Image (cartoon, helix red, strand yellow):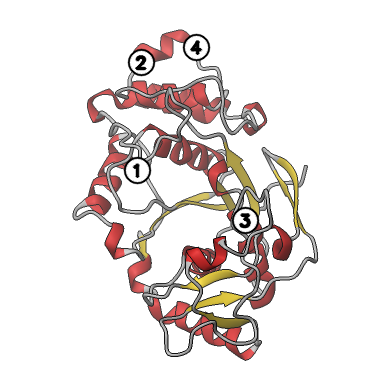
Amino acid sequence: MTDLPQNYRGRFAPSPTGPLHFGSLIAAVGSYLDARCSGGEWLVRIEDIDPPREKRGAAYDILKSLEVHGMHWSGDVLYQSTRSSAYEEALERLDVLKAAYPCTCSRRDISQNQPDGSERLVYPGTCREEPLRRNAPAALRVLTTDTPITFNDRIQGEVTVALESEDGDFVVRRKDGLFAYQLAVVIDDEAQGITDVVRGVDLLDSTPRQIHLQNLLGLRPLRYAHLPIAVDRDGHKLSKQTRAAPLNRRHAAISVVRALRFLGQQPPDELQHAGLEDVWQWALEHWDINRVTGSQHPASVFGGAQ
């Protein structure tokens, strides 16, 4: 396994679409401990580039929950809503490289051009030469190839993806003019000097796309570790969309202990009754990312109030 970088910089980057829940806490705890136990910095970024999905006051609520649960970040919080000029500059660089093009395809257009038996939508390159509809709202897509993109995830192991065949050209600016997640996260990771990304395995599929953009734009490569995700009793990922219960701030120490157990850290039973400071002291002394399972759907499921 590759050694940790000397100047480790990690981050937690939630979207302000609602309060933190147990699934969010897993990602926060994992990224926080990996950074702090590596002698590094842990930054917080609010990914507020999708106003239609955002909830008023959610960003403040998220930051307050992190503080209440004993996680304190380095430096100032970065808000993506202030970063439009950096994203525009990146799009201009892609244009100069002739690596992006306008696309007017709808989701229905794409689904109608899928191979029989396909389990996921793969963009077939319909608008590569010319938009399907002239004078129609257009997204911007990035050209991909089937040159394999391979990276070694610290938890999931080696991952290899041929983007063109398995995913297709992906969106970097939406039809409504909003910047896409894939572009914004790559530009901000570079700007913040991030070395390591520790996040949920539900974002594993995004990593080859982000590496592709890093390669196109000449940005530094990062190290990745994708944590298991919490699911409810029906096997659905805990999320704001599935109405996961908000974290109970009165039981912060208990929630952190549950997150540690979920991440395979095996805290002693007596820690369940300890104060928050003692919980973090134990966690910082015992964190071992090698104990984290690579499973996307672990046996430990928390679907109720946390």
Q: Residues within 10 Å of mark 2 (few under 14, many from 20)?
A: few
Q: Give the CA distance from mark 2 to mark 3.
A: 37 Å
How many angstroms separate mark 1 from mark 3 (CA)? Answer: 22 Å
Reply above or below: 220 against 230. below
Q: Amino acid at mark 2?
A: Ala
Residue 8 in view in this figure: no
Tag in front: 2 or 1: 1
Please state which of the two labelled residues, at mark 3 or mark 4, is closer to the viewer.
Answer: 3
Residue pointed to by mark 1: 241
Residue 20, by quadrant, is top left
Q: CA distance from mark 2 to mark 1?
A: 32 Å
- Residue farthest along the right direction in this orientation: 147
Q: Which mark is residue 253?
A: none
Answer with mark 1 or mark 4, whichever residue precedes in sequence. 1
Dots 1, 3 in contact, CB < 8 A: no
Q: Earlier in the sequence, mark 2 or mark 4?
A: 4
For mark 3, give the secondary structure.
helix
Residue 98: image quadrant is bottom right
Amino acid at dot 4: Pro
| Alpha carbon separation for disc pair 1 and 4 | 33 Å
Q: Which residue is mark 3?
A: 207
- Mark count: 4
Residue 268 numbered mark, or none: 4
The Cα atoms of the two marked residues, 3 and 4, are separated by 35 Å
Residue 274 - label? 2
Q: Position of residue 84 (x, y in %)?
A: 39, 77
| Numbered disc 2: secondary structure | loop
Labels 1 and 3: the sequence-earlier one: 3
The residue lying at 53 percent from left, 87 percent from top is 92
- Going by the numbered disc 1, the residue's amino acid type is Gln
